[in-house]
Image (cartoon, helix red, strand yellow):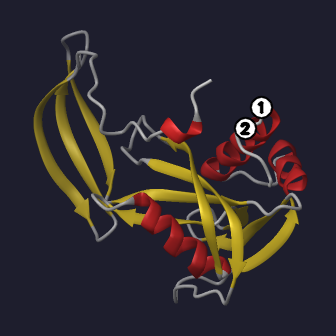
Amino acid sequence: MKDINSYHFHKKDPDQHPNPWHTLSDRTAYENPWIRVSHREVRNPSGGPGIYGVVHFKNTAIGIVPLDAEGYTWLVGQYRYTLDQYSWEIPEGGGPEGTDPLLAAQRELLEETGMRAARWTPLLELHPSNSVSDEYGVAYVAQELSFGVAQPEETEDLAVRRILFSEAVEMVLSGEITDALSMVAILKTREWLQRGVIRLV
């Protein structure tokens, strides 16, 4: 298995696969500070005409799995407007395109939980809805934690829970956690703990 010290995010690595799609036109149908929705006339892989709607995300999705030496993690609960339901998730946020995602992860962990971490391990990359959007996400494991006061944004009404990491895994398996980035990050962290890629101490 690849050593974690050499693990890196691959988004900017060149893609060697030829693109069978051809974009004939591209116009912005809607835009705000966070997303841009474009309408595209295309030629599909079979050579026929078609249309494609693409949602471009202006931020990188950031997720953090905090882990302490006793095997506990922290979840953040908030009401998700788009789903009209409450959601338990790992600490998450966004970082502007072109900026260091680690700096964004450090900021989000502090804002949502009041914690800082001395050890950060890149965990994964994710495209959560690649049929209609180019949204790109990354996640880290944060360890050697220190504690302060949370600094949530004005749009965030957050609850923070410290639970055993094994309980977070069960929340994924039972369907209590449905956020895609949280699910993948928690399950990959469990796998890395079992393989000894990361350790609690």
- Asked whether 117 or 44 is in front, the reply is 117
Identify the residue shown where x is 22% and y is 21%. Answer: 21
Q: Mark number for residue 192?
A: 2
- Asked whether 140 or 43 is in front, the reply is 140
Q: Percent from the top left, x then y, of residue 163? A: 87, 65
Identify the residue shown where x is 45% and y is 67%. Answer: 104
Q: Amino acid at mark 1?
A: Arg
- State which quadrant residue 115 falls in: bottom right
Q: Percent from the top left, x then y, of residue 63? A: 57, 58
Specify few, some or many for label 2: CA neighbours under 10 Å numbering under 14, 14-19, or 20 or more. Answer: some
* Up/down of 98 relative to 156, above or below: above
Q: Percent from the top left, x then y, of residue 96? A: 33, 65
Residue reaching furthest left? 24
* Circle 2/circle 1 CB separation < 8 Å: yes
Identify the residue shown where x is 65% and y is 67%. Answer: 84
Image quarter in which the C terminus is found: bottom right
SS assignment at label 2: helix
* Up/down of 2 relative to 183, above or below: above
Identify the residue shown where x is 28% and y is 16%. Answer: 17
Q: Which residue is mark 1?
A: 195
